[in-house]
Amino acid sequence: MTSSSETDPRLGLTVIHRRYVPYAHAHYAGNLVDGAYSLGLFGDVATEVCIRTDGDEGLFASYADVQFKAPVRAGDVVEVEAVVTRVGTRSRTLDLVVRIVCRGRSDLGATAAQALADPVVATTATGTVVVPPPSTS
């Protein structure tokens, strides 16, 4: 059941977080970070979506079509975006994306990094979150 069809003011709500990827999260050669790191970031941004739309932290119910399109590395700065695309009675569907906006450049020096002119899409997914039923009081 979808509430208020395409006129629901929650549709299109966008939440964006940015975060530095610490070297402590590198698990693989080349300072690669595992894909679960992106999923954890999706959980964080989805929590803010639920707080803004429903006044509750909500819970992730499922992911669909998770795609790892580019590697995330320690030293990157990532931007995580969630957009509400469907509003049900107790569920919200979100389009999710992780973009790399800055990249460490150890080839130029131990602490060298650069802002990317064109962010790199690293991970995309569709997620469904659930929230408690609206109070009747």
Image (cartoon, rainbow, N blue to C red):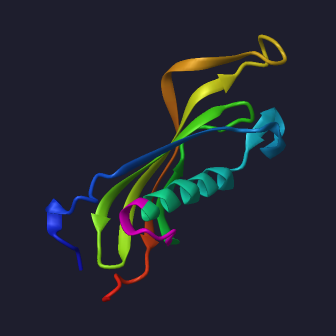
Q: Residue at left 34%, top 82%?
A: 134
- Farthest-out residue, bottom: 136
Residue 55 lies in magenta, yes or no?
yes
Residue drawn at x 67%, y 51% as measured from the top left:
37
The relative height of residue 25 versus residue 3 in the rendered view (above or below) is above
* 113 over 52 or under it: above or below: above
**Viewed as shown, does residue 33 lie left or right of 43?**
right
In this orientation, which residue lies closer to the viewer: 91 or 122? 91
Q: Is residue 41 left or right of residue 51?
A: right
Quadrant (top left/top right/bottom left/bottom right) for the C terminus:
bottom left
**Which of the 4 image quarters holds residue 23?**
top right
Q: In which quarter of the view is residue 114 placed?
A: top right
Question: Residue 54: where, in percent of width, then height?
Answer: 39, 69
* Residue 68 in the figure: left or right of residue 6: right
Q: Is residue 69 above or below residue 110?
A: below
Find residue 116 and report its horizontal and vertical position in percent: 55, 20
Can residue 26 be seen here? The reply is no
Q: Most extreme residue toward the front, as rendered?
A: 137
Q: Nearer the viewer, residue 40 or 89?
A: 89
- In the picture, which quadrant includes the N terminus? bottom left
Residue at 60% across / 56% down in the picture? 39
Provide the residue span drawn in magenta: 52-58
Residue appearing at x 43%, y 76% in the figure: 131
Task: State the image coordinates of residue 91 (x, y, percent, origin top left).
Answer: 37, 74
Give the side of residue 112 with respect to residue 58, left or right: right
Q: Position of residue 89 (x, y in %)?
A: 30, 79
